[in-house]
Amino acid sequence: MMQVEYPEGATPLDPDEIDGLLLTHITTSGELDRWEQDNILHALDWLERAKPREIVSETFVRQLHKHMFGDVWKWAGEFRQREKNIGVPWWRISTDLRALFGDVEWWHDHKTYAADELAVRFHHRLVSIHAFHNGNGRHARLMADLLIENAFGSPRFTWGGRDLSKSSTARSRYLDALRAADQSDYAPLLEFARS
């Protein structure tokens, strides 16, 4: 069985989830990171070709996760069905996503927030819901990028300009910004998203 080393703030996979690894030759976290990153690059290629229009939907949320991780994990694109150290109870995932999508539509229609803040709030709520077994942060960042780009014509975020899936100063800043957003202080996350 593969031994996974988790960076600060990562949600550990349980043995059943690790059994969902499609690439049985992977034995280290470094190998897993590389294969997941390659899969994400394929998802970015798919996005360029598909040019999705309706991204704020459960169908697209699942579809994007499947494209991001489906070559690595058999459960990619499927909502988790167990409790984790973060996230809403698993049975509330669909309901909470629908509420988020409704909020985003209302915020957009009523110009409640500037573009960056709306997309950052969307990102934060997606991370808080934690719909999937793994990859929630990477998925939520890409979803926010797609929202800011498609709904507002603004450039994608830079998210600290670093790989946030590994332990680093940038990852610590990102996690601190998420914790501040948990307390309704979005300023650090807004700053980090464009840093």
Image (cartoon, grey):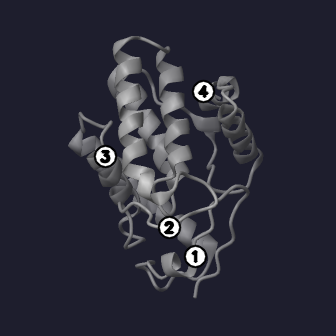
The circle drawn on residue 58 is 3
- Quadrant in the picture for residue 29: bottom right
Q: State the SS at label 3.
A: helix
**C-alpha gap between disc 2 and disc 3:** 19 Å
- Quadrant in the picture for residue 101: top left
Percent coordinates x, y for residue 27 in the rendering: 58, 83
Q: Residue at x 48, y 28 (%)?
A: 119
Of marks 4 and 1, which one's residue comes earlier in the chain? Answer: 1
Residue position marked by numbered label 4 in the rendering = 194
Q: Label 4 sits on what residue type?
A: Arg
Of marks 2 and 1, which one's residue comes earlier in the chain? Answer: 1
Q: State the SS at label 1.
A: loop
Residue position marked by numbered label 2 in the rendering = 82
**C-alpha gap between disc 2 and disc 1:** 10 Å
Q: Which residue in the rendered view is the most extreme toward the top?
A: 111
**Callout 1 touching callout 3 (CB < 8 Å):** no
Residue position marked by numbered label 1 in the rendering = 14
Q: Label 1 sits on what residue type?
A: Asp
**Callout 2 touching callout 1 (CB < 8 Å):** yes
**C-alpha gap between disc 4 and disc 2:** 34 Å
- Quadrant in the picture for residue 75: bottom left
Percent coordinates x, y for residue 26 in the rendering: 53, 81
Location of residue 118 with respect to 183 vertically, above or below: above
**C-alpha gap between disc 4 and disc 3:** 26 Å
> Is 9 positioned to the left or the right of 58 in the image?
right
